[in-house]
Image (spheres, rainbow, N blue to C red):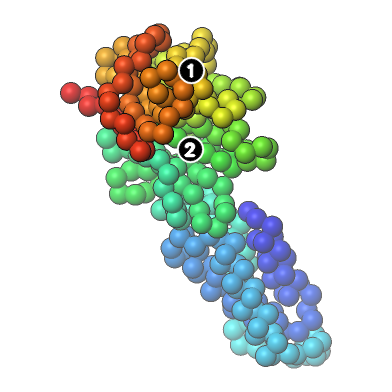
Amino acid sequence: MTTLTFATVAVVLYGILGRKGYGRALALGGSTVAGAAVVVGTTAVPTFYAVAIGAAVAVALRVLHRRPGSLPAGESLPPGVPLLLAFLGWSVFVTLMAPQLFDGLPARCDEIGHVSWSRVDQATLVIRCTSALDGPDRLMVIDLNGTVLRMLDDQHTRLDDPVISPDGRSVAYWAADGSGRPGGGGIYVRDIAGTTQPQRLTRDVAGRDADPAWSPDGDSIAFRRRSGENLDVYAMDSDGGDEHRVVGGPAEDEKPLYSPDGRQLMVVSNRTADGQPGDTDDVYLVDVDGGTLKPLGLEAATISTPVWSNR
C-alpha cells in the first residue's frame, strides 16, 4: 500500500461521508467502482494506479457537476446511488485486500532480471520481478503456466540473483533494503515453500555480496563480494559458516559456478596474466579450495552468464 493509495482512498471516503454534495459522492463512487473492476478483472494494473485514476475522474466529474450543500430534507436519494455506495465500499475493500486475495494470480512484471529452474520439480521456477512504477523488487515462485504460487521475501525492497538449491527445497538470493548506500546487502536463504523467515548468511558491511551459486551437494554456496573497486569470489557453508576467499586481487572476479562434480569453480574475470585488471573478460577454472586459475583463452569484450553442462 502506497501513500498515493491512502490519499485517494481518503478522498473517496471524504466525498461520501462529508455529505457536501451528492454530485461529488456520485462521481467518486462511480469512478472508484470502475477502478476496482480493473483490479479485480486483470490484477495486472497496480491497485494504487487504478484508485488514482478513479480519483482523477471523480475530480473532473465534480467540476462538471457542482451541487453544493447536502440533500434537502425529505428528498430521496437519486435512483442507483445506494447501489453505487455499496459498490464503493466493496471497491475500497478490494483496494486494501487485493494483494492478499489475488496473490496467486499473474502479477505485473515489467522486467524479469533473473530466473532459476528447480532441478527436482521442473514445473517450478523462481524469478526476480521489477515493476516499471518504481515499486519494490519481488521474488516469485511460479509454475510453467505463469501462475504466481507465492512471494518469497516481502521484507526487502531490492532483490536479485535467486538460485534454487539442488534438492529444490531452498532459494539463495541477494537482498537489501534500499535505504542505505548503493550496492549494499547480503546473501539470504529461504525455503521455497515460504514457511520460514529469510536467513541472512553474509554480513560484510564494507561491500556487497551477490551472485550466489550452490554446490551440487547443496552443502556450500559460492558468491562474489565487492570490496571497493574490485570483485572477489568467496565460498561458505550453506548455513553461512566457514566463509573464505577463493579468488581475489585487484581484478574483477565474479559469477562463480560449481562444476557438476563440485571440485572446481568457473569464474568470469577481467584479470591479465599478472592478475591486474585488463580490458577483456575470460572464463577461468579454479579448484574449490583456491589455487592457480586456468584461463580458457576466450578474451571477449564481455562475458555475461556462462553455464556448465550437467552431462
Q: Residue at x 45, y 35 (%)?
A: 161
Seen at 49% across and 14% down, the residue is 245
- Whether tag 2 and tag 1 are in contact, CB under 8 A, the answer is no
Badge 2 crowding class, 10 Å Cα cut-off, few under 14, some 14 to 19, many 20 or more, is many
x 31%, y 21%: residue:
295
Tell me the number on the disc at residue 160: 2
Q: Position of residue 168 (x, y in %)?
A: 35, 27
The quadrant the N terminus occupies is: bottom right
Tell me the number on the disc at residue 184: none
Residue hosting label 1: 248
Tell me which amino acid carries mark 2: Asp
**Image: 243 above or below 122:** above
- Distance from disc 2 to disc 1, alpha carbons, whole Å, reads 23 Å
Q: Is residue 62 above or below residue 38?
A: below
Does residue 266 sit above or below 243 in this rendering? below
Q: Is residue 283 above or below residue 23?
A: above
Q: Position of residue 153 (x, y in %)?
A: 53, 37
Residue 35: in sight, yes or no?
A: yes
Q: Secondary structure at mark 1?
A: loop
**Identity of the residue drawn at 51% across and 9% down:** 242
* Nearer to me, 202 or 244: 244
Looking at the rendered image, the disc whose residue lies closer to the viewer, 2 or 1, is: 1
Q: Secondary structure at mark 2?
A: strand
Residues packed near mark 1 inside 10 Å, few (<14), some (14 to 19) or many (20 plus): some
